[in-house]
Image: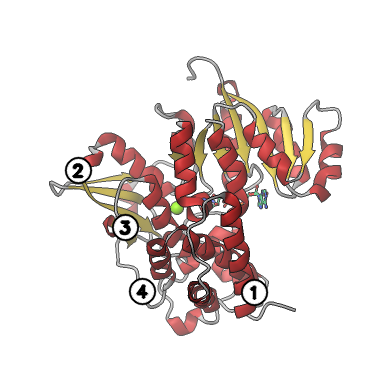
Amino acid sequence: EAAGAPMRLTVLGASGSIGRSTLDLVERYPERFEVQALTANTSAEALADAAVRVGARLAVVADPAAYGALKAALAGSGIEAAAGAEAVVAAAERPADMLVAAIVGAAGLAPTLAAVRAGTTIALANKECLVCGGDLFMQAARSAGTTILPVDSEHNALFQVFEAGNVGQVERLTLTASGGPFRSLSLEEMRHVTPEAALRHPNWSMGARISIDSATMMNKGFEVIEARHLFPVRPDQLDVLVHPQSVVHGMVQYRDGSVLAQLGSPDMRTPISHCLAWPRRMRTPAQRLDLAALGTLTFEAPDPIRFPALRLAREAMATGTAATAALNAADEVLVEAFLNRRIGFLQIAETVEAVLETMARNGELTAPGSVDEVLQVDALAREAARDLAGLTG
Ligand code: NAD
Ligand code: MG
């Protein structure tokens, strides 16, 4: 199926949900890819296994404490091992044709930005790069002439539909949302939900953080911000529509009233493969849609009372990149606190809102001019979130 030389590929966050789906495709078509580097946070054994399977040249763990285990697991394989946040950045800077950015959270910003500056085409799953880095990230891509391909299923859908249409004539973009596991719970019921229930996403199998963000719909808020940076539209042209079946992933409405949509089974290997093979397409094992068997697709407006995160994201987007960086940082802290049973589910969005109000009042939301300034805002927001949620001490 492949034509020409193999693609040199690096995967950041190779041990995660997106990373594993990416490597699943790589293993199906080994002749198409030449894997340069794989990175993970702490899972040394899983990373080493994957590196051996796909024949990577380098494997890196971000956590220095995992270096010994990685080195041991790679003994005799001829695969280079490294550890530490700087080694992840160095891996991202290695010459490659494409880098799959699949680290979770703000931790992905520095290494992904390094690859952007190196001119490597980015298959972007790590939406926090845009939520935290926003203008900075896109500016860096423009100056280096780097192509950013969206992996996030909704944005990948919009990108596919854009390819078929005329970008200048777009009226409205719609991101669909499953509504998560609590779509039909009352506010009172949502107050008492457990981490286990929140992690049980109805359609997608994903990492813990994005699963909780799907349950609060903060994920959709991040995706609105992500879309704002990826596509040439105004915030008021971005719509969210709840669609519990997750079959229609995104829609573009043109000025003649036509709406074009991308459909597919909820399997991230489809959007990942679209990036890997772009501008062509590759075969994937994703289950084929059987609309007759499905019978019904339903749509509803998101409820702003039970899912305030969407409003918070829009407000932060209107304020600017410092606010969206703070939104993400506070959410990272609060999602972890919820997973550790230190706060309730509704406290996630409540505290995020309080963090943004406090930081606005303190004049701490001025536009960051560098990654260091983003990380300063990020640190302030984490501190405020811990403080306001009573997580200190
Ligand atoms: P995950 O938790 O399954 O995997 C995260 C990966 O990042 C792991 O490899 C982990 O080792 C690595 N990592 C975590 N902290 C790190 C750190 N401090 N430094 C270096 N590496 C670190 O997450 P996921 O579900 O695969 O999501 C990854 C990204 O893709 C997220 O930004 C998420 O929002 C986005 N995304 C995921 C899906 C999905 O279906 N899972 C869909 C759309 C977008
Ligand atoms: Mg998505």
Label 3 CB-ligand 2 distance < 8 A: no
Query: x%, y% of residue 63?
Result: 76, 49
Query: x%, y% of residue 302?
Result: 34, 68
Provide the secondary structure element on which disc 3 rests. Answer: helix
| Left or right: 293 in relation to 57 | left
Query: x%, y% of residue 252?
Result: 26, 47
Query: x%, y% of residue 330?
Result: 57, 67
Crowding at dot 4, Cα within 10 Å, few <14 / some 14-19 / many 20+, comes out as few
Q: Nearer the viewer, residue 279 or 31?
A: 279
The amino acid pointed to by label 1 is: Arg
The amino acid pointed to by label 2 is: Gln
Give the image quarter of residue 87: top right
The amino acid pointed to by label 3 is: Pro
How far separated are the C-alphas under marks 4 and 2?
29 Å
Which residue is tagged 1? Answer: 386
Q: Which mark is residue 235?
A: 3
Q: Nearer the viewer, mark 4 or mark 3?
A: 3
Q: Mark 4 vs mark 3: which is more N-terminal?
A: 3
Which residue is tagged 2? Answer: 169
Q: Which mark is residue 227?
A: none
Q: Which mark is residue 304?
A: 4
Q: Nearer the viewer, residue 233 or 297?
A: 233
Q: How is the image coloured?
A: secondary structure
Return the residue found at the far left: 256
